[in-house]
Each structure stands twice: as C-alpha cells, then as structure tokens.
Amino acid sequence: MGVDVSRLKASDLFEVLDFSELQDIAAIAYEKEFEAGHVIFKPGDRAEEIYIVEEGRVSIDIEVGPSERITVYVLGSGEFFGYPSLLPSKAYTVVGTCLEKTKLIAIQGDKLLSLLEKDPTRGYKVMRRLAELIAKKLAETRRQLVYCVLPPTRA
C-alpha cells in the first residue's frame, strides 16, 4: 500500500501541498485498475474513496431515465473525483464509468479526513482547493445547462 508522493502532487486536488505534507497521504493511497466500461459507482452507492485518474478517462454521468445518461464531465490524467466520500452523506448521485482501461489512485475518504483533521493548516489547504474545484465544476455544469435551455444565437 502507498504510492509515490510525486504521483499525488501531480493531481489537481493535492497540487497545493508540498512534498512533506503529502507523505502520510501517499502512505494511505493505493492503486486500482479497471477495464473500459467498468462502472465505478452509481447513484445510491456509498462513497468511500476519492480517486485521482492516473491513466485513462472516466465519465461522470447523470441518469435521466431508466436507460439514459447524460455525460456531465469526462475526467483525465491528474483530475480527482469522488468527493462525496469527504461529506457527511457519503452517497453518490451520479454514475462514474471508465471510458477506456483506467488506472486510478484511491484514498479512503475517512482516512484522509482523519489526517486532515490532525493538521488544520493542511486540512484548510485541501478543503479550500476542493471548494475551488467543485465551484469550477458547478460553473461548467451551469454553462451546459444554459446552453441546453438557450442555445447560442447567431449574429
């Protein structure tokens, strides 16, 4: 168990931490590999891990019917997902699917929270970065929604 610190540092979530702040996080991280088409989670599943894409791509979709999904994001190398594992509800509301063979770094949400609580400065850095990344995703989603409702007009 454990991954090299530089692999975490390359992620959008942990890029705000220095190498010394990442060492004990790297010690609790581990690898997961999935084939194309593998569903990592679906709505209602308990969120236990955060993930960082190392290789491959992961689609985050919303279910809009019994057999229809709309892709909200496609995540690639260095991008993280699975933040519900850091929230009290710990439940997914979306579907996460591997679009190709995918290699992930995974970290148990509860273990990460425990480490962040022990070092409030580091915890603040990570949670602030998490808020920034979620706000960015929310803005992207808002733009998609506006585009669906009000397609651009041509001048």
Image: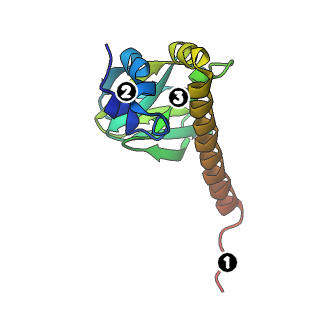
Q: Position of residue 56 (x, y in %)?
A: 32, 40
Q: Is residue 146 above or below residue 118?
A: below
Residue with the mark numbered 2:
105
Q: Position of residue 88 (x, y in %)?
A: 68, 18
- Residue 153 is labelled as 1
Q: Which is more toward the observer, 144 or 86?
A: 86
Q: Is residue 59 left or right of residue 93?
A: left
Q: Which is more toward the observer, 24 or 64?
A: 24
Residue drawn 65% across the image and 52% down it: 139
Whichever of labels 2 and 1 marks the residue nearer the N terminus, that label is 2
- Mark whose residue sits in front, 2 or 3: 2
Q: Is residue 148 left or right of residue 45?
A: right
Quick one: SS at disc 3? loop
Q: Amino acid at mark 3?
A: Gly
Residue drawn 65% across the image and 72% down it: 152
Residue drawn 51% across the image and 46% down it: 73
Quarter of image, res 124: top right
